[in-house]
């Protein structure tokens, strides 16, 4: 290749590079509002969106806490989200959103179908985002500060995605909830989040109230409409019949004293034979001690027979009562959040009869036992 | 050395690279729309058919080793000039449609996943330039690139699948075959257009050189591994997304979300996704090469240098999305051509060993 050709190739490559840099309009991080949490409320028949936006570049202004909230309203969710962009002057980027919260009024009055569709059909929104509803408005929730970490979205999402499974609270994500509302009996649940005020003061956000989150109740939905709210004990009963959820704590009486037993593990099997669904739950219990809270502590030294049979029997009775209480609610309001219809589907296939088979018509037997781990 | 010559190991890695492409992009959702959670059965059936056809093609390659006739020459010597024209024209249409859909879906995935707005004309121009350079350098360069990228791509797909696989409720696949044999067969027939990637072998007929006398073993091994990964993607996708699977256009980017489900520390799945996306580019280049060879064989021309007008002619249909929805156009075109495409993809291979034998005999005794 002579030098003229080399020069020609060099010029061609240089021109192409310029063209490429002009043609690929990547958006700079400063042009984006990276939303980590989104709250949705109903205010005067309008949708109000409250976004928790990561706020980079504050330097020494803040240490550790790095988010701000912005609220906007619109006739539709899409319009409200766009209006947040107008307020911030940046494009709303939903790809990093980890939490979606529906306010109480919205849940009570609005069908969630269209709102869910907005997120589910998005290519960038994570279906794995945690979704829940809250007491009061989502705006109030986002405008508070979580006492231990600061960011409402990141802490609440982390709690519900990892910690909840070990403290007997079933949780859900956008995908599971959206699927539950359109498959089989079309019923599903969302965690119901309440805030508890604290007197702690944050040096970073003195204007915002500091709170803890409590999410030990679940709200039930059918076809995107709110159905009922399960009490705390009914939620515990639900957790007993749910896979991958453990950490139930039972307080029983022994020689006049209260003894706490914790179930870090359980075996759960659901079978369907001769027209009867059979739930078999075996709780594996340990005495609650300082070194076995919250984790599956398989390395804790095992002492044989620490728990008398009498205590195990008490746990069994209590668990049975909790499960029955939950099941009564499930039958009364005709919802299925333990996947009984899914079990029948996998056995007999999908058909219209199954999709509208009421819970009252499914015979169920529980066999709950407790044993020492 | 012939710049298009490749050995069987290179062909094996190329088969793996080419195998996934759109099968991890829009095909899982199309199949979920047809047969729901039985989509993996359709994929499995089509891969078995592909494996059989590929074996027959490799057999034809073995027969052809002595005289090293091109695919076009074999057709001309056996099914006349008209037959050759028809077959190659069908292949040309097939390759152009596949290139178009690959470009559209990878563009879409890139734009939506990484939030980068790209000018389509510039995107197509760059793809065409890469293809032109690749054709200039010869197929050996493409094969070596895929050889180089093979471990990276394999690891990327594996990384994308491992964690989501642990979260799959496998009972979602039950009852197996719920869609019914008829629907599964119908879906396999109508979606066969998206499979049959072994056709690349036709256009390398005279260039494949068995390494250590082994031709079938390496190619079939990588094919089996690639096919298993694609089936796994389908299983994971339908199990995780259920009734929503048909609404999720790009399967792999949806599945990748689950590889970071428990993390709020960013999207490192984007890294593995970007690496895997290179295999789509390699596939586009390979199909571009094949389309180029079709034109070459149809026109009976043997260019001393790569023909720029031919490259432009292949790249021109890629501008279709500027005017109409390419998805609709391709879908309509593929519906019309389902039977002819199915014939060249799944009937022709059964005749290939015989055609290669006859053509080689004619070449030996003109």
Image: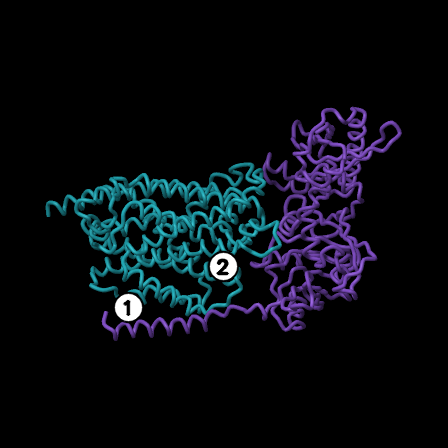
Task: Name which quarter of the figure residue B306 lies in.
Answer: bottom left
What colour do you see for chain A?
purple
Q: Residue at x 73, y 30 (%)?
A: A366
Query: Along the line of sight, which residue is nearer the eye, A206 or A188?
Result: A206
Q: Is residue B323 visible?
A: no
CA neighbours of label 1 inside 10 A, class few (<14), some (14 to 19), many (20+) = few
- Pick whichever of labels 2 and 1 is earlier in the sequence: 2
Secondary structure under badge 1? helix
Residue corresponding to mark 1: B309
In the displayed structure, does residue B184 sit left or right of residue A244? left
Task: Name which quarter of the figure residue A288 lies in.
Answer: top right
What colour do you see for chain B?
cyan
Marks 2, 1 in one chain: yes
Subunit bearing disc 1: B
Subunit bearing disc 2: B
- Please tell me whether residue B183 is drawn above or below residue B91 in the rendered image: above
Residue corresponding to mark 2: B109
Q: Residue at x 71, y 56 (%)?
A: A149
Q: Position of residue A44 (x, y in %)?
A: 78, 66
Q: Check contact, mark 2 vs mark 1: CB within 8 A.
A: no
The tag on residue A221 is none
Query: Along the line of sight, which residue is nearer the eye, B86 or B299?
Result: B299
Q: Position of residue B245 (x, y in %)?
A: 55, 50
Q: Give the number of the mark in front: 2 or 1.
A: 2
Secondary structure under badge 2? helix
CA neighbours of label 2 inside 10 A, class few (<14), some (14 to 19), many (20+) = many
Furthest-right residue in this view: A256
Q: Position of residue B141 (x, y in %)?
A: 30, 56
């Amino acid at each position: 290749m002579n030098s003229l050709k080399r020069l020609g190739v060099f010029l061609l490559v240089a021109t192409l590079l310029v063209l490429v840099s002009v043609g690929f309009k990547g958006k700079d991080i400063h042009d984006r509002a990276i939303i980590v949490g989104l709250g949705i409320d109903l205010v005067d028949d309008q949708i109000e969106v409250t976004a928790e936006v990561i706020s980079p570049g504050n330097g020494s202004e803040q240490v550790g806490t790095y988010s701000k909230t912005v609220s906007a309203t619109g006739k539709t969710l899409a319009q409200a989200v766009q209006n947040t962009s107008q307020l911030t002057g940046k494009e709303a980027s939903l790809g990093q959103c980890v939490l979606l919260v529906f306010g109480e009024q919205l849940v009570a009055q609005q069908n969630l179908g269209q709102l869910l569709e907005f997120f589910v059909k998005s290519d960038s929104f994570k279906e794995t985002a945690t979704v829940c509803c809250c007491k009061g408005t989502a705006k109030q929730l986002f405008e508070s500060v979580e006492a231990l970490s600061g960011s409402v979205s990141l802490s609440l999402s982390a709690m519900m995605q990892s910690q909840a499974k070990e403290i007997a609270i079933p949780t859900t994500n956008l995908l599971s909830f959206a699927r539950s509302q359109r498959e089989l009996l079309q019923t599903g649940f969302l965690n119901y989040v309440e805030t508890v005020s604290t007197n702690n003061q944050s040096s970073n956000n003195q204007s915002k109230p500091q709170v803890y989150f409590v999410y030990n109740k679940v709200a039930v939905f059918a076809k995107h409409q709110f159905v009922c709210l399960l009490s705390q004990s009914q939620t515990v009963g639900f957790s007993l019949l749910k896979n991958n959820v453990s950490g139930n704590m039972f307080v029983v009486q022994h020689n006049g004293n209260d003894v706490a037993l914790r179930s870090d593990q359980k075996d759960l099997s659901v079978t369907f034979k001769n027209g009867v669904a059979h739930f078999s739950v075996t709780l594996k219990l340990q005495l609650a001690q300082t070194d076995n809270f919250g984790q599956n502590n398989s390395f804790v030294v095992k002492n044989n027979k620490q728990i008398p049979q009498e205590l195990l029997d008490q746990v069994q009775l209590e668990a049975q009562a909790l499960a029955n209480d939950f099941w009564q609610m499930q039958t009364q309001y005709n919802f299925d959040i333990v996947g009984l219809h899914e079990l029948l589907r996998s056995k007999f296939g999908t058909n219209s009869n199954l999709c509208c088979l009421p819970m009252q018509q499914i015979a169920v037997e529980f066999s709950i036992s407790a044993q020492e781990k | 050395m012939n710049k298009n010559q490749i050995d069987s190991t290179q062909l094996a890695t190329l088969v793996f690279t080419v195998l996934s492409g759109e099968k991890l992009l829009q095909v899982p959702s199309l199949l979920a729309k047809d047969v729901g959670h039985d989509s993996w059965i359709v994929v499995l059936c089509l891969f078995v058919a592909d494996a059989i056809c590929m074996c027959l093609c490799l057999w034809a390659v073995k027969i052809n080793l002595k005289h090293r006739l091109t695919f076009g020459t074999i057709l001309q010597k056996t099914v006349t000039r008209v037959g050759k024209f028809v077959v190659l024209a069908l292949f040309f249409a097939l390759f152009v449609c596949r290139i178009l859909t690959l470009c559209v879906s990878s563009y879409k995935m890139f734009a939506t996943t990484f939030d980068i707005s790209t000018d389509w004309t510039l995107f197509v121009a760059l793809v065409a330039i890469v293809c032109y350079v690749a054709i200039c350098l010869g197929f050996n360069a493409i094969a070596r690139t895929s050889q180089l990228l093979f471990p990276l791509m394999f690891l990327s797909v594996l990384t994308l699948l491992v964690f989501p696989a642990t979260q799959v409720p496998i009972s979602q696949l039950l009852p197996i075959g719920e869609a019914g044999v008829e629907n599964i067969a119908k879906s396999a027939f109508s979606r066969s257009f998206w499979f049959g990637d072994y056709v690349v072998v036709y256009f390398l007929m005279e260039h494949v050189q068995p390494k250590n006398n082994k031709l079938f073993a390496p190619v079939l091994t990588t094919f089996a591994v690639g096919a298993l990964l694609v089936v796994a993607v389908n299983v994971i996708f339908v199990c995780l997304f259920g009734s929503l699977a048909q609404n999720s256009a790009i399967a792999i980017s949806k599945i990748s979300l689950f590889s970071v489900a428990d993390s709020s520390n960013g999207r490192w799945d984007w890294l593995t996704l970007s690496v895997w996306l290179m295999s789509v580019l390699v596939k586009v280049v390979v199909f571009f090469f094949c389309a180029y060879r079709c034109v070459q064989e149809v026109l009976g021309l043997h260019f001393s240098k790569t023909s720029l007008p031919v490259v432009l002619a292949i790249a021109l249909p890629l501008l279709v999305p500027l005017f109409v929805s390419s998805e609709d156009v391709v879908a309509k075109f593929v519906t019309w051509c389902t039977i002819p495409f199915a014939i060249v993809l799944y009937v022709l291979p059964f005749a290939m060993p015989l055609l290669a034998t006859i053509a080689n005999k004619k070449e030996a005794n003109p």
